[in-house]
Image: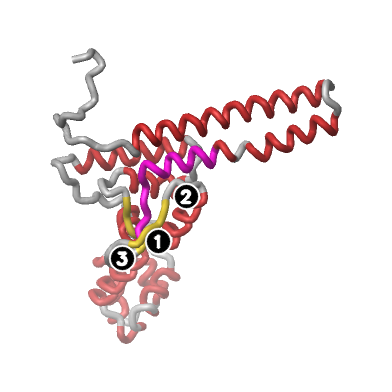
Amino acid sequence: MPGGRLTQQERQQIAVGLADNLAYAEIARRLDRPTSTITREVMRNGGAAGYRADLAHRATQKRTQRRTPAAPQGPQALPQPYGRDAGAVREYEEALTTVFMTSGLPKMMARVLGSLYTTDTGSMTAAELAQHLQVSPASVSKAITFLESLELVRRERDQRRRERYVVDEDLWYRSMIRSARANDQFIETARQGVGVLGRGTPAAARLESAARFLDFVSEGLIRTAEQCREVLYTGTETPPGGTDAAPRPDGA
């Protein structure tokens, strides 16, 4: 017994059978179809008196098109300056997103961050992100709120008073400081435990060692972050070939 949707030829045979006053069961037998299929087809397309094969076929096609989900779209390619290959940029953005995900960011947050980092301005509006990533504005808003809590993005208003989401060098500094300070609570609690458990006992020694290690690492991170910020981001930029250009490593 054939399955699937009725063909246009089968619908024409149904119309002929109705014109000959055949019962639904007889039409179904001739088409090798279930009687319920013929009954449903006729009743949803005008009934026995109003059934037209061509109209029924077009109506079914329209219903099928409405039910067929649109094919999922990937990120829309942004216009690329400097002669960049749009396909290569898209692939790189996906690779960068994967790196962010590997580091622990949820997928949507990683996609938003990857999009921001691969724009020359380092900023996009919610509408631009939603269009680029083919997601809802609500998804973008949720991702931005999460990234903002980690100090990985910041908000600002442009000249048209639109809210833009920005990534820049200073955010890495602030994120590094936040990460280092996140150890402070454990360090303080661990040292409280030394007094409770008794200095010199194995448990107290373990906590004291962990506190000293994290304290040392945190201080080193903060000191290095501040030095890097001063050297890399607050120095005076000099045009290439300027008189203040830094010397080459070989001394030339």
Residue sitting at 51 percent across and 34 percent down?
222
Q: Residue lying farthest top? A: 250
Disc nearest the viewer among 3 and 1: 1
- Examine the rendered structure and indicate whether residue 53 appears above or below residue 205: below
Kind of residue indicated by mark 1: Ser
State the image coordinates of residue 241 (x, y, percent, origin top left). 14, 29
Mark toward the viewer: 3 or 2: 2
Cα separation between marks 3 and 2: 39 Å
Q: Is residue 111 visible?
A: yes
Q: Quick one: label 3, few (<14), some, or many (20+) residues within 10 Å?
A: few
Q: Residue at x 51, y 51 (%)?
A: 149
- Asked if residue 246 is positioned above or below residue 131 in the image, the reply reads above
State yes or no: discs 2 and 1 in contact (Cβ < 8 Å): no
What residue would you read off at disc 1? 136
N-terminal-most mark, 3 or 1: 3
Of pointers 2 and 1, the one earlier in the residue sequence: 1
* Residue at mark 3 to residue at mark 1: CA–CA distance: 23 Å
**Dominant secondary structure of the residues highlighted in magenta in the image:** helix
Question: Which of the colour schemes (rainbow, by chain, secondary structure, one colour) is used?
Answer: secondary structure
Answer with mark 3 or mark 2, whichever residue precedes in sequence: 3
Magenta span: 164-179
The residue pinned by badge 2 equals 147
Please name the residue that numbered disc 3 is placed on: 65
Q: Nearer the viewer, residue 26 or 228?
A: 228
Q: Which quadrant of the figure contains the C terminus?
A: top left
Measured as percent of width and height from the top left, residue 16 is found at: 26, 76
